[in-house]
Image (tube, rainbow, N blue to C red):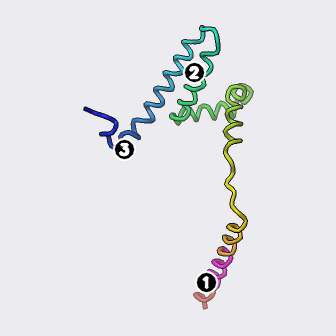
Amino acid sequence: MLTVASLPRVEIARLRRPALQASGWLVMGLGVLSLPIPGPVSTPLLAVGGLMVLRSSVSARRHYVRARDHAPRLVRPLFGRFDAWRHRHRAPVRVPAKVLAAANDVAANDQGELASVTVAGNA
């Protein structure tokens, strides 16, 4: 009997991306089929399925970026809020001033040592 625990880690990683892509297309298909149903059923299904496909497919991501760059008025209303949220929640890495000062001191000392080595090597 084949179980997930019996598969090697490499096999799981190799099967994960196509499974995620297929499930994303399935969710998007359910969203299209639920369009005639009254109420906000299809929009979340289409959005979740689209995000699953974008996360798992390099070509889908490339087409999305190309459409976003060439037709921003069409794409921004659909994904603009998500992009803004994603960029807003990616906090920049903050390095304490002491660490920066120490790194600058090390870099300055390294440059001085390199200069003395090259001068001594040429002499």
Which residue corresponds to the image point at 63% horizontal and 35% vertical from the top-left? Answer: 65
On the image, numbered disc 1 is attached to which residue? 118
Secondary element at tag 2: helix
On the image, numbered disc 2 is attached to which residue? 45
Residue 72 at what x, y percent from top left? Answer: 72, 30
Q: Nearer the viewer, mark 1 or mark 2?
A: 2
Marks 1 and 2, Cα distance to the nearest angstrom? 64 Å
Q: Nearer the viewer, residue 108 or 116?
A: 108
Residue 6 at what x, y percent from top left? Answer: 30, 39
Give the quarter of the image for residue 105.
bottom right
Q: Which mark is residue 9?
A: 3
Q: Magenta segment, which residues?
A: 107-118
Q: Amino acid at mark 1?
A: Thr
Give the quarter of the image for residue 68.
top right
Q: Where, quadrant-wise, is the C terminus in this rendering?
A: bottom right
Q: Nearer the viewer, residue 22 or 93?
A: 93
Mark 2 neighbour class, 10 Å CA radius: few under 14, some 14 to 19, many 20 or more: many
The tag earlier along the polypeptide, 1 or 3, is 3
Contact flag, marks 2 and 3 (Cβ < 8 Å): no
Report the magenta stretch's main SS: helix
Which residue corresponds to the image point at 51% horizontal and 34% vertical from the top-left? Answer: 57
Q: Amino acid at mark 3?
A: Arg
